[in-house]
Amino acid sequence: MATRHNLVTRTVDAMRRLAPLRLADTSWDNVGLLIEAPTVRAEANRVMITNDLTNAVLEESLADKKVGMIISYHPPLFRAIKTITMADPKQAIAARCIEAGISVYSPHTALDAVEGGINDHLISLCGAGDVTCLTPAPGATEEDGELAGYGRRVTLKEPVTLDDLCLQVKRGLGLSYLRLAVAPRHRAEQSEPVSTVAVCAGSGSSVLLGKRADVFLTGEMSHHEVLAAVEAGTSVILCEHSNTERKYLQTTLCKSLNNVFAECGWQYSVVYSKSDEDPLKTV
């Protein structure tokens, strides 16, 4: 049996500390070490983090001979596969990673659910208040804390206008724009203030719909899901899918993983991909 390279072993261990896989929704998600290269690049001592493992991100990692591990928040291999061919873009990326000696790990919904994870970052942008979890993670244990699960809801200590909330979100995520659907009670001249916000990073409808809040904040929802929320009296803020996740990955996850390496005395570095970006642009 081949021996797993220290960079891979230690990165997997560190990520499982930061986002235990028991918190992931494995009823549909695919998390953990998804691609393990049988040999690792000779100079490998660096981990690259990305939201999505695209061809552009792969080319960037191949150009840096020190990258031996990629953490792709979204799993590049999602559904079961029966072949690995270069004709399929996702399979081709996996094959090229293996050939180059680069392993790939995905935390996805484990990082959404963990306390201090992506959804806690997103809810923090809305203002101070009492935060609860919308859907507890079935695999959570007592040590994971009360917030371990999918989505968050905050009751703000100081209510804000919908316009001010949008500005806070844009500043916090580094965005120039977002999409907004305004419920009738937030349209009037004397519109009601926003007291409660429910958030879910990425595609949040399965977690948010049916929950009570003045505003839903997520990456994407379908036309009819937005209509249903607005008709129920909830305004909707959409930032595009990966825009709700990227800032946390660039800042908090990079710092946290570097800290674990340093605490353990492991001489590895962590970088965020310069090629990773949301595929949708406003033109």
Image: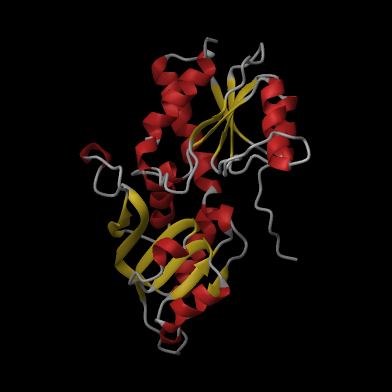
Name the residue located 57 percent from the left edge and 52 percent from the top edge: 242
Name the residue located 39 percent from the left edge and 19 percent from the top edge: 263
- Give the answer, above or below, for where 215 lies relative to 176: below
**Left or right of residue 207, residue 182 in this image:** right
**Left or right of residue 143, residue 90 in this image:** right
Residue nearer the viewer, 198 or 192: 198
The percent coordinates of residue 105 (x first, y second) are 53, 32
- Give the answer, above or below, for where 214 lies relative to 64: below
Q: In which image quadrant can residue 198 be found?
A: bottom left
Residue nearer the viewer, 279 or 258: 279
- Colour option used: secondary structure
Residue 181 can be seen in this image: no
Residue 236 can be seen in this image: yes
Q: In which image quadrant can residue 275 be found?
A: top right
The percent coordinates of residue 78 (x first, y second) are 57, 43
Name the residue located 50 percent from the left edge and 73 percent from the top edge: 225
Instruction: Give the quadrant of the C terminus.
Output: bottom right
The percent coordinates of residue 110 (x first, y second) are 41, 42
- Give the answer, above or below, for where 149 lies relative to 41: below
Extreme-right residue of the structure: 87
Extreme-front residue of the structure: 82
Q: How many marks?
A: 0
The percent coordinates of residue 54 (x first, y second) are 69, 41
Extreme-bottom residue of the structure: 189
Q: In which image quadrant can residue 199 be found?
A: bottom left
Residue nearer the viewer, 124 or 69: 69
